[in-house]
Amino acid sequence: MSITDAVILMAGTGSRLRGSADTIAKPLIPIADLPLISYAIDSFQRAGVTTLHAVVGPNGDELAAAVAPLLPAHIRFHPITNPNWQKQNGISLLTAAGKVRAPFFLAMGDHLFELSILEQLVAQADLSRLNLAIDRKIESIFDLDDAMKVRTEDKLIVAIGKKLETYNAIDTGIFLCPEIVFDYLRHALKDDDCSLADGVRLMAEDGKAVGIDIGEAWWQDVDTPEMLARAEEGARRLFR
């Protein structure tokens, strides 16, 4: 199976990282001497992606101009402006509806992850459902309070939420999405806003969301200076 398209969400302002990077957009923050976004680009390239869609916000033109030179020549770069960037990440993904070829990879612009996570998604995917890469190594999660918790029964996702009391995995923010994800996000809208988790929750209710265990693979989101330091250590250990 060949996945040609990937979507990266990078419309936020990264306010929680202001203490470490006042003037640099979060995807461009240097980690082990490379921009954060470079690691995702490299993983997508090695996974066979040929079109990268980047959902951008208020600094979109400048960010797109900085990201474009980081891509290999054979990858088409397609920035998508989210005029409602202040809203939740479900709205960011909805701006890609009709512009991306499904099934497609989805990742967050502030996440660092190993290629093997994408490979696991492709190898185990159920293309009729949403496939979410989940981490069952709960003890290894850096900031568990802030993590998106997931409860699965066999492979089916049955619950998702940061405040979930009973869970057996963590959402890595890396997906392989079918076209129907956009329908579910539209159904999840309340006051013209929704999160990805809202869409996943509705899909789970219909048995349309599965968790793909990443095994021993490593990932890290970069929301705070402390997470940035952990990402730096992981990048130097695994990617250099």
Image (tube, grey):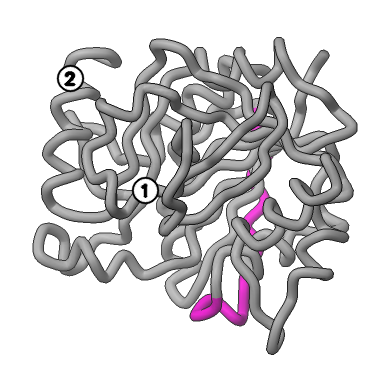
Q: Residue 187 magenta-drawn?
A: no
Q: CA distance from mark 1 to mark 2?
A: 23 Å
197 shown above or below 123: below
Q: Position of residue 55 (x, y in %)?
A: 59, 59
Q: In terms of depth relative to the viewer, which is nearer, 7 or 131?
A: 131
- Near mark 1 (Cα within 10 A), the count class, few <14, some 14-19 or many ≥20, is some
Q: Amino acid at mark 1?
A: Ala
**Mark drawn on residue 236:** 2
Residue 74 visible here: yes
Magenta range is 75-87
Q: In terms of depth relative to the viewer, which is nearer, 53 or 121?
A: 121
Side of 171 relative to 131 (left or right): left
Q: Amino acid at mark 2?
A: Arg
- Name the residue: 71% across, 10% down: 123
34 shown above or below 100: above
Please name which of the two marks, 1 or 2, marks the residue nearer to the observer. Answer: 1
Q: Position of residue 174 (x, y in %)?
A: 55, 36
Is label 1 in a helix, a strand or a loop? Answer: loop
197 shown above or below 126: below
Pointer 1: what residue? 147
Q: Earlier in the sequence, mark 1 or mark 2?
A: 1
87 shown above or below 28: below
